[in-house]
Amino acid sequence: MVGRGPEHRVSALTMACLLVLGGVMGSANLLVEGLVHDGVRRWLYGGAMLLCVVAAVPLLVRQRAGRWQTFGLVLLGDLIYVVVALCMDDPVRHASPLMLLFPALVAAWFLGPWELAVNMVVVTAACLAGLWQLGGPPVGLAVQVGVSALTLNAASVGVFVLRRRVERLLDDTRTLSEQDPLTGLRNRRFLVAQAPRIWRQARRDGTRVAAMVLDLDHFKRLNDAHGHATGDAVLRAVARALSATVRPTDVLARTGGEELVVLGLVADTDEATHLAERLRAAVAACGTAEGPAVTASIGVALTRPVDGEDVTDALWKLIDRADAAMYEAKQRGRDQVATMWAVPARSDVA
């Protein structure tokens, strides 16, 4: 539940509302004659209901809950069940172990494996403490505790497994939405998503953002001569070569066709040009068994981010400038790097 996104606020507020609702509804039992033991147990019961309401206050104020806070609330729910079971005059009717279902499910959905395991042990102990006062033969008590604890813990494990499955599906979906299926490189969506991080780091470090647009030379001619399967193999080989060449902090993405973009931080134009030359050499050196080697024309553009600018708009303007420089590299003979500040007229080259 750690975080500040809308889903974390909803989760925290939902838990807070359930705590308040449980405390208020539980307090109503104090108004029913003979439902709660008199004396110390009555005060203990009232204190437990008040504790539910008090525990909701931090959730309402902060609108988020950390891992340890959630774990503490789960254990508090287990403890309150025990208090209610000990204070009720007829715990069989009014303090069923099913009261432990809510903290058990919260633990299964929001906590890690070891916290869930701890809560499963605590749930078993809480069932024993709540049912102990019923008396009867030990075998009967053991059966009741076993059935209650097994039911609750089985539900917890089931929800935990379902949660992990949902998380894996969400991760797979996120990966597919940000990954080019042919080359395995990142795509335009990922490039846009990473731009704010890169812009922030550039402002913080006083560096510049460099965009390098790479376009494979005569790629259409290669496809026509050798077929699209060979063209795809060449693209995958180029992607592997570039992935091994870019710096770990750079973002390498395929933006369409045979065009790729590298986004990174540099100190000046010389550093950007040096990085682009490394990429050009990597493309020229790669090859596949299915087709010929290729070369790439690379355009480089730099910008110094400023506060308050629209990052997405600034990103595409930077890429447009690098794209224009790439076309200048093609006009100069291809298989080279061009850094341009003025935007040239685009001619029909490939």
Image (cartoon, grey):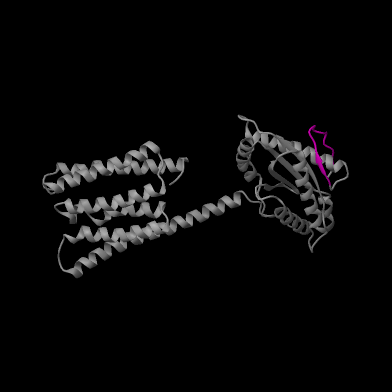
Percent position of residue 184, x then y: 66, 54
For residue 153, side relative to residue 331 (left or right):
left
Percent position of residue 181, x then y: 66, 54
Residue 194 found in image quarter: top right
For residue 198, side relative to residue 41 (left or right):
right
For residue 135, side relative to residue 9 (left or right):
left
Q: Depth check: 259 or 53 in front? A: 53
Is 181 located above or below residue 205 in the figure? below
Is 25 located above or below residue 139 in the figure? above
Percent position of residue 334, x then y: 85, 46
Q: Depth check: 197 or 85 in front? A: 197
Percent position of residue 51, x then y: 26, 43
For residue 200, side relative to residue 272 (left or right):
left
The residue segment tinted magenta is: 336-348
Residue at image coords 85%, 43%: 330
Which residue of the protein is positioned furthest toward the bottom in this rendering?
Answer: 139
Q: Is 341 in the magenta?
A: yes
Q: Depth check: 331 or 270 in front? A: 270
Residue at image coords 41%, 57%: 160
Which residue of the protein is positioned furthest toward the right in this rendering?
Answer: 333
Q: Is 134 in the magenta?
A: no
Quarter the C terminus occupies: top right
**Residue 20 in sight from this viewpoint:** no
Q: How many marks are shown on the rendered structure?
A: 0
Which secondary structure dominates the residues rendered in magenta? loop
**Residue 3 in sight from this viewpoint:** yes
